[in-house]
Image (tube, rainbow, N blue to C red):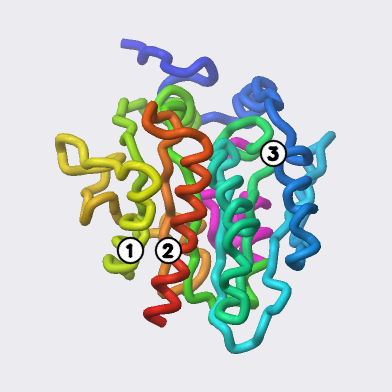
């Protein structure tokens, strides 16, 4: 019996080749502007923070400069805080929550920590509201040696000289309804695997490092964010997105073996946030603020427990 197609590209049971990737890429439409939405906000921060271009993505006919924002009063000997957003370009609050943190809160840590914020790691995907880069590669499975994703490789080059000094790394993400309607079916089709429907959690949650968990740190972030937006409950299996809930709003992943951004340094405190913007109980503003609040809570805990 022939398998039923669940995605408009490819043949069920067969992984994509170059032709299918090209067909997928041809269907991607620019919906928003990296220059207008992100670069303009970074420019507005230049009077207060240092801004450096750490790479450039040339995806003809487009070219995207990659920027990181740094503490102007960078001091050797202080712990470093790494904040990343937009690894998946469609996860809007990851980008704008990072920028909100810089604008509203970063100055509070002057003289206490060196801050490095990369707010939009995947600008091509940001504009097209997608997880993948133009080669249908997920940057958040590509933080590894000889990375196939230039987005991931550029960030790894940026943080490599700082890795020993990074105390906390918080990577800002979203889980959306489109994960189930578009991105998971696309992933299964790309890899020639069957699509198995899942459940989208309603609320904020965190992903800790299964190989070096920091449960008290995760709970401090959850407690702070719970004042801004609701925390995702476990499903009927006691899971969130197929992983066991180990504490309210917390699951564990093997960050480094999976090539996830949150595993890119040896930071003692590492976490990935997941905001749910499609909830009727959350506004875009709440989602951005939840991300910024999570960053503050992560830094505050880490500085208090170095």
Q: Which residues are magenta?
A: 135-157
Are there few (<14), some (14-19), or many (20+) residues within 10 Å of tag 3?
many
Q: Locate the C terminus by quadrant.
A: bottom left
| Residue 31 horizontal side relative to residue 217, left or right | right
Q: Secondary structure at mark 2?
A: helix
Q: Nearer the viewer, mark 1 or mark 3?
A: 1
Q: Secondary structure at mark 3?
A: helix
Q: Locate the N terminus by quadrant.
A: top left
Q: Are marks 1 and 3 in contact (CB under 8 Å)?
A: no
> Whole-Å distance between the Cαs marked 2 and 3?
30 Å
Q: Residue at x 73, y 48 (%)?
A: 41
Q: Residue at x 44, y 33 (%)?
A: 176
Residue on which the image places disc 2? 297
| Residue 164 horizontal side relative to residue 244, left or right | right
Q: Are marks 2 and 3 in contact (CB under 8 Å)?
A: no
> Whole-Å distance between the Cαs marked 2 and 1?
7 Å
Q: Residue at x 71, y 39 (%)?
A: 37
> Whole-Å distance between the Cαs marked 1 and 3?
34 Å
Residue on which the image places disc 1? 220
Confirm whether the magenta stretch covers residue 263: no
């Amino acid at each position: 019996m022939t398998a039923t197609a669940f995605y408009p590209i490819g043949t069920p049971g067969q992984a994509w080749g170059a032709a299918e990737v090209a067909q997928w890429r041809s269907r991607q439409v620019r919906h928003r502007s990296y220059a207008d939405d992100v670069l303009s906000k970074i420019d507005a921060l230049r009077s207060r923070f240092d801004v450096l271009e750490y790479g450039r993505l040339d995806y003809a006919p487009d070219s995207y400069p990659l920027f990181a924002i740094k503490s102007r009063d960078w001091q050797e000997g202080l712990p470093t805080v790494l904040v990343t957003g937009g690894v998946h370009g469609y996860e809007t609050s990851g980008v704008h929550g990072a920028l909100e943190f810089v604008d509203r809160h970063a100055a509070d840590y002057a003289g206490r920590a060196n801050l490095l914020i990369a707010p939009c790691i995947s600008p091509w995907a940001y504009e097209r509201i997608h997880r993948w880069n133009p080669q249908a590669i997920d940057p958040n499975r590509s933080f590894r040696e000889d990375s196939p994703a230039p987005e991931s490789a550029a960030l790894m080059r940026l943080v490599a000289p700082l890795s020993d000094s990074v105390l906390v790394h918080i990577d800002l993400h979203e889980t959306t309804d489109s994960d189930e309607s578009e991105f998971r079916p696309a992933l299964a089709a790309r890899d020639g695997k069957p699509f198995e429907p899942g459940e989208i959690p309603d609320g904020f949650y965190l992903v800790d490092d299964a190989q070096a968990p920091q449960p008290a740190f995760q709970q401090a972030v959850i407690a702070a964010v719970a004042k801004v937006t609701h925390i995702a409950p476990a499903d009927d299996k006691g899971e969130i997105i197929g992983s066991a809930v180990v504490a309210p709003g917390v699951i564990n992943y093997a960050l480094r073996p999976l090539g996830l951004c949150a595993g890119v340094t040896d930071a003692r405190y590492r976490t990935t946030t997941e905001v749910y913007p499609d909830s009727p109980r959350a506004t875009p503003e709440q989602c951005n603020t939840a991300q910024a609040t999570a960053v503050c809570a992560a830094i505050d805990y880490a500085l208090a427990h170095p």
